[in-house]
Image (cartoon, rainbow, N blue to C red):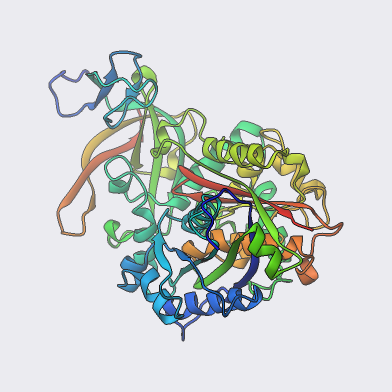
Amino acid sequence: MGEIDANSEMLVRSKKCVNCGAVNHPSKVRCRACKGTTFEDVSVPPAGTVVTFTTCNALPRRLGDRKSQGFAIIQVAEGWNVLGQLDDADAIALNDLVEGRWEQVSTNDDGSPAFGWVFRKGGA
Amino acid sequence: MITMENTRVAIVGAGMTPFGRLETQGLMDLLSEASMSALESAAAIDKNIDSVFVGNMAAGELCDLCGIASTLADRLNLLPAGADRIENGPASGGSALRAGFATIRAGLADLVLVVGGEKMTHVPGPRVTSAVAAITHETAEKIYGVTLPSFAAMLARLYLDKYGYAMEDISAVAVKNHQNGSHNPFAHFQKEISLETALSSPVIADPLRLYDCCPVSDGAAAVVLASEATARELTPEPVFVTGSGQATDLQIVHERENPTFLTAVAASSQIALDMAGIQPSDIGVTELHDAFTILEILESEAVGFFPPGEGPRALVRGDTAVTGSCPINPSGGLKARGHPWGATGVAQAVEIFWQLRGAAGDRQVPNEPRFGMAVNFGGFGNNVVTHVFERGW
């Protein structure tokens, strides 16, 4: 994945605790590690390594007519984790490098789109 | 008599409906049947019940019902008993038991009915999947359509890689629990399966297959709790609740430092064991929350029965069989007895009550166990309720 401008929407954004440095993704009222309440913005490119993954064949209504969907926990730069969908779980192994894009991942009950990260194998 | 004094708390009666696809009974029918069975078992059918606690996860979502504890009190003519529905996801039953225990122990009630139940099989599978997926984190997890089987599968993959096991080592839980379930007349599945059957069943969320996952079930279970003085009047064989623990963990699975060690299971169990003044090795019979085969393994390690990574070896040795040194899920567990969400935590207590009384029939754990344990796993392990039980005679 090439360089991404710091202002790009194509970044995984979260909150780092000013007191202890733990990243809370997504943000919380009090830090998961130290209960601190002051945070600073952090953002990293949507790329990292596969911590674990699965392909699920029994899906909730929000995924519509899909018959199966891959999911993975990805460790991004700075060492914190995110959950995302996988493009092709059959091509994935533990510790693989992946890169992601931000797009519609499901549909809410009211018909509105829900956006999130979708990862595929690749990256340096 | 309500004394406002701390007292020991005992189970004096228990009952349950069969678990399974119960097409002719609605949720209130199931709750009523289990409750009446427990009241009759306790010889308390004509006694005044001070409080009713109903463990239920999704009456609103699946049955379009609300206020079900009030409805039950009316249907059973338990008036003017206090009545509350307790919701803690799949651990709603365990939390209802804990509420009943705490109420008597605090001196606010003398005789309490705890019942858990769920009606699930009448709605389409994706709706049930959506209802349970609603306990995942709204913005970090739920939006992706991730499910509890997905999380269990991701933990299984991590565990297999970390300790060098294959799925046959994990799926052996299903073989054991189906064998136990074959001796349980209340179980959803009452037939044995082979390891080959488990390993060739359809993939639900790889590496987990159909037989690694509990079924969707209807059913209800109930116990009657009493203060020690009243328990001694009602029965010569009370089973005391000697430990009650509850603990939470990070809701978002990807935030957990070591996802394969179930921190809330460990914490809630430690609290319950400390309250009871015993060690894991003292426990003679245990019901764990095996919604997925991997969870029985992980919970058995988190409780402290086996070191991390040793659960599958203990299983293969037969330690966790009914006749083993550490019997786990003699009822068949969620895997074979079934998993009507709100009922499960209470059904676990019912099984331990029967086991400690020596009344579990062909699945009876030998050698008259004195202590039992039940672990009810709420959310995806982020709100766990554990109880310890002891024979009172």
Relative horizontal placement of residue B357, taking residue A11 as reference (left or right): right
Q: Is residue B372 visible?
A: yes
Numbered label tally: 0
Q: Position of residue A11 (x, y in %)?
A: 22, 26
The residue closer to the viewer here, A69 or B11, is B11
> Relative to B360, does residue B388 appear above or below in the rendering?
above
Q: Is residue B214 visible?
A: no
* Residue lying furthest right: B367
Rendering quarter of residue B365? bottom right
Q: Residue at x 72, y 60 (%)?
A: B330
Relative horizontal placement of residue B296, taking residue B194 as reference (left or right): left
Q: Residue at x 77, y 43 (%)?
A: B282
Q: Position of residue B358 (x, y in %)?
A: 79, 65
Rendering quarter of residue B310? top right
Q: Position of residue B8 (x, y in %)?
A: 63, 51
* Residue lying furthest left: A7
> Relative to B231, does residue A76 appear above or below in the rendering?
above
The residue closer to the viewer here, A43 or B104, is B104
Q: Quadrant of the N terminus of chain B?
A: bottom right
Q: Quadrant of the C terminus of chain B?
A: bottom right
Relative horizontal placement of residue B130, taking residue B212 as reference (left or right): left
Q: Residue at x 39, y 63 (%)?
A: B84
Q: Residue at x 64, y 45 (%)?
A: B297
> Relative to B141, does residue B214 appear above or below in the rendering?
below
Q: Position of residue A107 (x, y in %)?
A: 21, 54
Relative horizontal placement of residue B288, taking residue A43 as reference (left or right): right
The residue closer to the viewer here, B119 or A4, is B119
